[in-house]
Image (spheres, coloured by chain):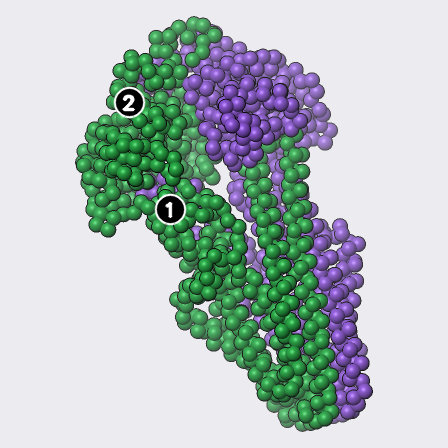
Chain colours: A purple, B green
Amino acid sequence: MASVILRVYRYMARDWKTLTLTIALLLTSIALAMMIPWYVRDLLNSIMVFDVSRLLPSSLMIVILTFLEGVVAFLDRYLFEMIAQKTIYRLRLDLYRHLHELSYGFYDRVDVGEIIVRITNDMDTLNGFISFATMQFLNAIFSAVIALSILLSLNVELTLVAATLLPLLILIRTLFDRKIFPIAEKSWRAMSQFNSTIQEYTSTVKILKALGVEDVFGRTYRSRLSNLYDLNMKFERYMSISWPAVGLVASLIQITVYLYGGSKVISGALSVGDIVAFLLYLSMLNWPLMGIGFFFMNYQRASVSASKIFEILDREPEVKEQPNAVELKDARGHVQFDNVTFGYDQNKPILMNLSFEVKPGEKVAIIGPTGSGKSTLIKLIPRFYDPTSGRILIDSVDVRSVMVKSLRKNVGIVHQDVMLFAGTIKDNITYGKSSASMSEIIEAAKAAGIHDFIASLPKGYDTDVAERGVTLSGGQRQRIAIARTLILNPKILILDDPTSNLDAETEATVVEALRKLIDGRTVFIVTQRLSTLKLADKILVLDNGRIVEEGTHEELMKMGGVYAKLYNAQFAHQEPLVGSVEKVGLGNR
Amino acid sequence: MGWVIGRYARGEAEGKPKGSPVKIMARLLKLVWKYKVRVIIFVAAAAAALGLSVIAPYIGKRVVDEGIVAKDINALTYYSIIFMVIAVCIWALSTIRGYSVAWLTQKLLYDLRSELFAHSMGLDYAFFSSTSAGQVISRFTSDVNAVGQTATTGFIDAVFNTLTIVGALIAMLSLNFKLTLVTLSLVPLIVVSVIFLARRSYRAYRNVRAKVGELTTNIEQTVSGMRVSQSFSERDRENLRRFERVSYETMRANLRATLVMALTRPVLSIIRAATVALLVFYGGNLVVSGEATIGTLIAFYSYVEMFFNPVITLTVYYNMLQSALAAAERVFEYLEAKPSVKEQPNATDLEIEKGEIIIENVSFSYSEAKVFENFNLKVKPGEILAVVGPTGAGKTTLANLILRLYDPQKGCVLVDGVDIKTVKLRSLRSQMALVPQEPVLFRDTVLENIRYGKPEAKDDEIRDVIHELGLDPLIESLPEGLNTMVSEGGGNLSVGQRQLINIARTLLRRPKIIILDEATSSVDPYTESILQEALKRLLAGRTCIIIAHRLSTTFLADRVIVLDQGKIVEEGTHEELLRLGGLYAKLYELQIGKPMEAEMLSASPAGTA
């Protein structure tokens, strides 16, 4: 818990020069602030002896000192904020960079909303904590130390008496800390969960209303809301008790001094002026004590935020680049799967002992029922996941020993779920190659069969794509995604069901264009459309994570096996397809 | 369609409230006043604590004057004990006060969030399609949060700060009139400078918020698209650069805002110093001349503190108040939004027996875009009607009108001869079902997702439905069968598995009328055949309208209509339309391939669609 905050502070340490300056300024401002009571004491003493000559100069000093103190404090605050902002800036960048290194597996499991919360809200909380609360804390500590020193110089005995209650404060703090941290964490989670519930609501609201089942969701909503409320209340309960305790301790210290010091004055061991001065400086302890209390209040939430951020920073990416990774130059596009086994969950393998070879320039189509592992297979080639056992070779080199960036430059993949980014169509197509020339862009667009459509738009390639490709049809989005990959001119091309979202007319266009484009490349296509299958030199039929048939279209038809039956079944389309699955004998566990 | 809430769709920045701030504040306070008892307890505790803290320096003065200076040990002890008692009471009362405030804040947040949802249930679909998800989400989260703090803690603090000022004033006046005047002399200066600085800092923080908004959008894009950007390794550098830039700008905006905020310190310090100096100077003279005691002077010293801090807090509060009231206003506007598709007061239940749908002279447009004009359609009971046509022809709108997600501007929709506007929404919707294009999934188990079709259904009923549809093989393909958890957006399920939930959910309702918005993503042939069969069983004996995109289900239909720009251009059975050789035939050919040539395709490698 404490260590988490210390880690954050380590980020601050990089600015140690400025930090030293701020501490110097802080000490100066505190010293200045401390001097004022001297003058007040001076004044009071002279008032006591009815000497008015010192009134004016002392009053002036007070004004000047306070002014100086204000200026110094301002500089201090500003510099401190600068350090805090830089720290957050660095932390954000580190987090961002690390997110880029985390692999597919991470993104499969994690909730996007939660990540965003960490980068925004949690950083914000930390920001406030580092700049404001920490500075206050330092101020408080130094003020307290200086005040204590002055008090000691005034009267050692009184100071010791007053200080006996400070350990009490520390004890209270420690006890509460231990209790509060887990609660703070739970309430963070509750807030996060509530946020995702709202998000879920907005994305499912149409069907909820259409089916008239909104109140079912309402039950979920209400329980999450109650949970949030309960946890927040618990946290507040602890806070409300501990916060005023600081003030109580301060008062108790004051009383101790009153009684002890007062009796000393009465017995003549101390002058009134002395005790008055002491009391004035004692009251200077009040504010630092509050400051320390305030710091610990914020500390809780900040600790939780910091721990959430470090949770991600500390996560090891599953797919790591080896230290002596090589570049993949002049890839020929020879791909081999050597006894590959893989499962998202190690105990539930999806691919089992898969072995096959694809020669450079060969086009391979992969078909199989749902869950047979088609999409998974192709994701292993660009190393989005590493196989549990076995290896994948490109040009006889294990992909694990290739630099990830180099690998992905040579292996282009068009995913099934299309994601476009905010920006123009041109921005999207050049996503992976910002230096692409207009002719390259047009060529890629033509190959994807979308150039004509883009050209028909009033702004052409400069048309803005609404976030996440909302204003374009599914087919259009897919074709832009295809163009995006094609422009990289990869030697190995992977297409995960590229025509699934296309209607017949567009599919035809795309297939035609693809035909030209796959020339000279090694291509893997996951598909179930006949027209696309025809592009392949070789077909792999996958079932239950194993290859059950392999060959060209003609060979497989002649075999009269699984593939042939399926092929015929798909084209007896007009009749009901009852029992075609059983006929074909696939999809059984 | 004249929405009050339409403004939200444009996305406004937080800022000043449009209406009267006083009215908004009053409304917020009314919400808090629901919990009178707590409020009173809080007020009482806070007042008592306040009163005691005002008295404390008084007692301190007595300790010094009557105990120490006068060297009276009894007085010393006496007043010290009173001081202690006061301190303990202040602690206890502060605890009660702090807890009550927290309780009220949380309660207010809870109430607002409950009400927002309850009201959402009454809003129609049109509202949600015209309001961005982001806006809706901020109502529930950040806007409510902003309100929460300000309405309770903030407001109450403000009141008490005011009372503190008043209390300190009274105490000071009762001690020494002249010194009080001296202390107050520079207050106007404080107020003026704080307002000036506060305004500048408010502007600066608004810039910060804008930058943070940019940052959030950047991250959202990148993180959601992380898988894609990982496929394009060169992109990483570019993305990082952009992120760096926005982060840097955010940092600078923050610093600028801090600069202004920090300036408050020296400004206030000088004024405070001047006040103290004046106080001591003038007060010193008074003590010398015997008009005041030294204890009084010391007391005034602490009252000055008690005075200045509230003034500063109040000014800061004033600024927070602006944006908080703006947030509150947005929340209230949401709560006042009215749906256009409303249940009529004398709406009745309808028992759909035949399932005949008549669309009579319907004209409909979404704000400016006209979709239908004098549109007529009759769907016979139990008929399966396929609606085909290019994008924007009105297919989805047709579905929305039948489901009463929108009301036509002219004309009406009749089910079994009854205008659906006169039917209770619940009654109508419970007998209809929408099978959307993309299955809508919840973060729950597959079983629960299916149960959304009929919340009261028992587990066995669900299993029976799955069996009836022949979807068992798809269940078996799930890692944990029906208990598999569906992740956000259904990412961990295949397309086929998602469709399974879609179809099973629909049959569970045993609806009389089904609107099937055909899925656009295709699946492998194995899964396709299972799903096709399931669909057949689902649609049997019910009136169905299939909005066909892929034309793979049109052969299930009894009749097909082809829509183009809101008009029926072709109508007939699948065979009739093929023979017609018009728009339908053309679309079908492209999609499926000429029926005659299917066998020929298997011979030549160069076949295309």
Residue in the image at 37% along x and 11% along y: B594
Residue in the image at 42% along x and 32% along y: B478
Q: For the C terminus of chain B, give its image quadrant.
A: top left
| Figure quadrant of residue B349 | top left
Percent position of residue A73, x then y: 73, 65
Query: What type is the residue that disc 1 sits on?
Result: Gly
Can residue B441 be seen at all in this image of the molecule?
A: yes
Q: Residue B560 carries which label?
A: 2
Q: In this view, does A461 lie above or below B55?
A: above
| Figure quadrant of residue A99 | top right
Residue in the image at 66% along x and 74% along y: A286
Judging from the image, mark 1 belongs to the subunit labelled B
Q: Is residue B410 above or below residue B383?
A: below
Q: Is B546 positioned to the left or the right of B310 in the image?
A: left
In this figure, which residue is indicated by the disc labeled 1?
A: B2
Q: Is residue B120 above or below residue A566?
A: below
Query: What type is the residue that disc 2 sits on?
Result: Val
Secondary structure under the numbered disc 2 in the rendered image:
strand
Q: For the N terminus of chain B, give its image quadrant.
A: top left
Percent position of residue A337, x then y: 59, 19
Going from the N terminus, do you reach mark 2 or mark 1 first? 1
Can residue A316 be seen at all in this image of the molecule?
A: no
Count neighbours of disc 1 (C-alpha within 10 A) and say few if under 14, some if 14 to 19, many if 20 or more.
Answer: few
Percent position of residue A344, x then y: 53, 32
Percent position of residue B396, x then y: 35, 32
